[in-house]
Image (cartoon, rainbow, N blue to C red):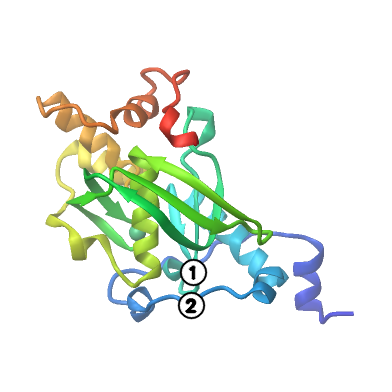
Amino acid sequence: MPPLASFWRYTGVVPYLREIITDGHPTLRKVAKKVGNDELRDPLFQQLIDDMFETMYAAPGIGLAAPQVNISKRLFVVDLDDEKGEQGPLVFVNPRFVETEGEIESIEGCLSVPGMIGDLTRHARVVCSALDRNGKRFSVEATGLFGRCLQHEMDHLDGVLYTDKAKNVRVAKTEEEHAALAEVEGEAGGIARVAEALRADGEPVRADAEPILADAEVDQAAPEPALTA
Ligand code: ZN
C-alpha cells in the first residue's frame, strides 16, 4: 500500500497547474536529461504529462516543454487543436529530428518570455521521432505551424530560447501582436495571427499560410494535409 500522497496519484489522475518559469531561471538554460524507461512508467511521470497538458491549455498555448515547468527532462507536449483540422494532442519523449529540410520564416513568442515576439528562420519541414507516453516509438512529419512548434519545443530541451536565434525581438505592441499573445502566448501559435496581419499589409503569402487561415476560421473544414503525415 503506497503512502497516501502516492495513493492519490495512483487512483485518480487529477491534473493540476504547474508554474511556468520564465527567462532568467537556470532550468531553461540546461540541456535536459533523457527519460529512462522506468521513469516513463512511473505514475509520477504520467502525472507530469497530464499536468503539462493542463498547464498548456490554461496558459493557453499550443506547446509546452518540461523545462518550462522546471523539470529538466526531454519531454514536451503539443496540441494545435484537431477540431480546427490541426494536429491534436501529442506527447514527445526523448524526441529527435531524423529529417530536416528547407527554410521558413517564423514569428514566435514563448510562454517563458512573456509579452515578446521575434522573427527567426526555421526548417520548413521536419520529421520527428520520439516515444509516446507508453514508451512506443513513433515518428511524425511536420510542416507549417506544427513543424515550427516542434522546433521551438525541441530547442527548450537543449536550453535554447527563441530569443537566442531571433532578430528583432520586441515587445508586442500592435493590436494584432497583443491579440496573438493574449490568445496563445506564443509557442509559434497565436503568433500566426501576427503573420496574418502582416499578410493583410501586403507581405507575400507564406508556405505555412494554411493553418493560420484555418485557425482564423476562414475555412475550418480544410485541414493542412502536411500536418498529418
Ligand atoms: Zn517556448
Residue drawn at the location 33% of the way across and 47% of the way down: 148
Callout 1: few (<14), some (14-19), or many (20+) C-alpha neighbours within 10 Å?
A: many
Left or right: 69, with 160 as reference point: right
Which element carries disc 1, helix, strand or loop? Answer: loop
Does 193 sit left or right of 141 as displayed?
left
In percent of width and height, residue 215 lies at: 38, 29
Viewer-proximal residue among 94 and 218: 94
Q: Are marks 1 and 2 in contact (CB under 8 Å)?
A: yes
SS at mark 2?
loop
Q: Which residue is mark 1?
A: 74
Q: Spatial distance from mark 1 to mark 2, Cα to Cα?
A: 6 Å
Residue 33 circle label: 2
Please state if 160 lies on the left or on the right of 227 as rendered.
left
131 left or right of 118?
right
Q: Amino acid at mark 2?
A: Lys
- Seen from the viewer's position, the closer of residues 38 and 2 is 38
Q: Can the viewer see residue 68 in this picture?
A: yes
Quadrant of the drawing holding the N terminus: bottom right
Please state which of residues 105 and 215 is positioned toward the viewer in this rendering: 105
Residue in the image at 29% along x and 68% along y:
160
Residue 133 placement (x, y as % from top left): 64, 59
